[in-house]
Image: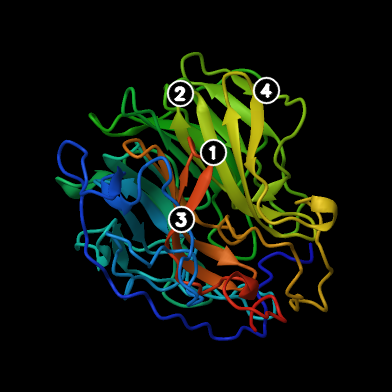
Amino acid sequence: MRNFLSFSSLLIALACSSPAPTTVVACAADGTCPSGSHCDAGICQPGAAADASTGDTAADGNGATPDSGGLCLADLSGGPSPRGEAYGGFAGGQLLAFSGDEGVAVSCNPNPKPVADGWQFTPCVGWTAAATGAPDPRARAGFTGDGGSAVYVFGGRYRTASSGNYTLRNDTWQWTKANGWTQLDDGTTGGPKGRSSTVLGVDPTTGFLWLHGGNASNNGLSFAPLGDVWFLDPSFGGWQLFKTTGKAPVARIMHAGAVTRDGNWLVIFGGGDANAFQGPFFSDTWRLDLHTGAWQAIATSGSAPAARILGTMVASGGSKVLLFGGHDGGDVGNRNDLWELDVANGTWTVLRNGDLGQGGDPNVVNKPANATCDFPADFMQIDQDSPERRESALFSWDDAGQKAWLFGGKSDCGALRDVWTFDVAKGKWTVVDDTPKGWSCSRYVDPCTHLCGG
């Protein structure tokens, strides 16, 4: 697979001055805002709700954040370094991002650089360092949110150097705004063994955590896929192995998954096996009935996402989930397509194709690479209204705003640290922090002669 982790070896340092903060106006308790603005997810935005627009309104080349006439603009200075494999989610009115890997591949070869800090992004405020008391640092952990009140994390891997074996985690934590981080299980109670690249979901109707699969190898060059299912009741603590029935999906790692908001299903998609770096990757979709324990393959008719690893999934309401990005097994590599799956009826729907290739096909390149890790500016036809193509991103759901939040990941052009939201009702991405580190050149520079630099 030619394009896995295909960050250019000719990366050019990207610089972008953040727009100066303007007056921050939060919505009143009754949801009202000053004249000439409207309330959107607790923030007063310019214009009436019916005609509110987003997009870069000034010719300053700093991306798509509205910076002209806005009543509410976060201070985007400071904040986390670009990174992928972070854990966290949207809870307590803010986006949490902890740990991860800020290493950028060299000549297409992975170059892990673990990072151990934590950050909070608050709408209208911006980035601030997170309070202490976070779990030990880790990357490729399982993480999930319950829609806005709590974030959970399990497992992951960590090492202090850029080489050698990893330490595998198997502890479980919860974050709430009132209590900060609380350890739910210290990993010594006989629950799941240490692993990375696992799926973690939460059932908001019961508070149960659900876990599937992952990688039990502590060697970064080999994989040991798992296929077990566990559940934990945070009220009592202690993981329990869940006995399933029927044909089960093969053991896998780097897959996407979630528990539906109605509490009926654990769903997983894609991933890889012991050859996860080389492929072929999986394109199958499975659902586990959390009441009966029965596995069932979802046989889709019509369109469905291409096979991939390192995509990310969130439960968005009822029996529906959203899938974003990941890394496919073809020439495109990193993806930025967005899909919705109705788990109950097994129907995939593409919400945005993202970047397109020849003939408007998102599954082929528009122009071949010049050489290994050397991409022309028009490698793909850039969708300016979607986030950069990426894998290993942080993706979370906000019930109150009915939006998905996206942070970071890794692209063809390096590690990322931008923040986006997707409004399902409007079918629209909005960039909240437009820091273009790791972005394709053509997203913010004209003319652009090379994918990753002008």
Give the spatial CA distance, label 1 vs label 2. Answer: 12 Å
- x, y percentage for residue 316? 46, 34
From the viewer's perspective, is the residue at label 3 or at label 1 nearer? 3
* Residue under numbered circle 2: 318
- x, y percentage for residue 329? 76, 54
Question: How dense is the environment of label 1, judged by Cα within 10 Å: few (below 14), some, or many (20 and up)?
Answer: many
Give the spatial CA distance, label 1 vs label 4. Answer: 25 Å
Give the spatial CA distance, label 3 vs label 4. Answer: 47 Å
* Residue under numbered circle 1: 322
Give the spatial CA distance, label 3 vs label 2. Answer: 29 Å
- x, y percentage for residue 271? 65, 46
From the viewer's perspective, is the residue at label 4 or at label 2 nearer? 2
* Residue under numbered circle 3: 54
Assess whether mark 4 and mark 1 are in contact (beta carbons under 8 angstroms).
Answer: no
Of callouts 4 and 2, which one flags the residue occurring earlier in the amino acid sequence?
4
Residue 308, above or below 14: above
Q: Which mark is residue 247?
A: 4
Mark 3 residue type? Thr
Of callouts 1 and 4, which one flags the residue occurring earlier in the amino acid sequence?
4
Of callouts 3 and 2, which one flags the residue occurring earlier in the amino acid sequence?
3
Mark 1 residue type? Leu
Check disc 3 and report its element: helix, strand or loop: loop
Assess whether mark 1 and mark 3 are in contact (beta carbons under 8 angstroms).
Answer: no
Question: Is residue 448 visible from the viewing direction of this image?
Answer: yes
Check disc 4 and report its element: helix, strand or loop: loop
Check disc 2 and report its element: helix, strand or loop: loop
Give the spatial CA distance, label 4 vs label 2. Answer: 25 Å
Of callouts 3 and 1, which one flags the residue occurring earlier in the amino acid sequence?
3
Residue 210, above or below 370: above
Residue 222, above or below 146: below
